[in-house]
Amino acid sequence: MSDPHICDDKDLKELCPSLDLWLKPQAKLNITVALPRLKVLDNSGKTMTISTWEVMDKLKKKIKPLKFKTIKVSKSTIEFIRFEAECESLSNQSLIESRLNKMSLKLSGFIEQLTVKTARVKIGSTRHEWETYFRDNPLMNEMKPGLRPDTIHVQVLYQSY
């Protein structure tokens, strides 16, 4: 019986061929949907509401046949809804980004179109952020091994999954 294929292996980088270990880069997007000004419905003071599920479903439909690996609301305000989505591969990320960026969405009950903007998620830190963190942290001592920013300590790396 062959091993099941669990992910798109286009972007895999070899870590340790003898142990059959691979690294896969993360392909994440921030999707920001700008919301129209919410209007008061009547004299009761109630305002129109927007369903994040409805917006999420519209986004999923716009990228078909591609799919998000995961998508979740990372921030929701009166002005915008921000989603964090993970794509299957870097090539899918580029396609999804081009399909959604500067696109308009129509929601039921709203006259105005919602505008969508996408941006790739910055993964990791810049060298300056990394050095500043370790320099300014009182618990770190660059003179001691294991406490320097250039030290990686790997313990109990499992050989079977």
Image: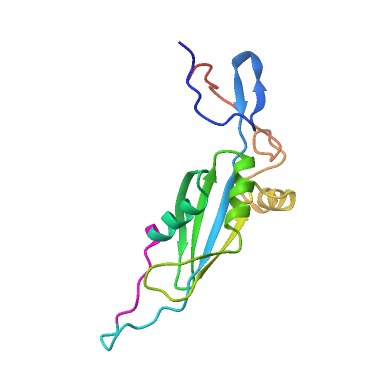
Residue 15 within the segment the image draws in magenta: no
Which is nearer the eye, 159 or 97? Answer: 97
Residue reaching furthest to the top = 1
Can you give x and y, in whole percent of width and height, for residue 76 in the image?
Answer: 44, 65
Q: Is residue 69 left or right of residue 20?
A: left
Where in the figure is residue 63, as x and y percent of width and height? 52, 50
Q: Residue at x 50, y 71 (%)?
A: 113
Tell me the quarter of the picture where residue 43 sits.
bottom left
Which residue is located at x 47 percent, y 61 percent? Answer: 75
Residue placed farthest to the bottom in the image? 43
Reply yes or no: does residue 47 show up in magenta: yes
Colouring scheme, one of rainbow, by chain, secondary structure, one colour: rainbow
Image side of residue 45 versus residue 7, left or right = left
Percent across and percent down for residue 26 are 59, 40
**Magenta residue span:** 46-53
Q: Main secondary structure of the magenta part?
A: loop
Residue 133: x, y in percent? Answer: 66, 51
- Regarding residue 126, the answer to whether it shows in the image is yes
Is 38 on the left-hand or right-hand side of 80? left
Residue 110 position (above or below residue 130): below
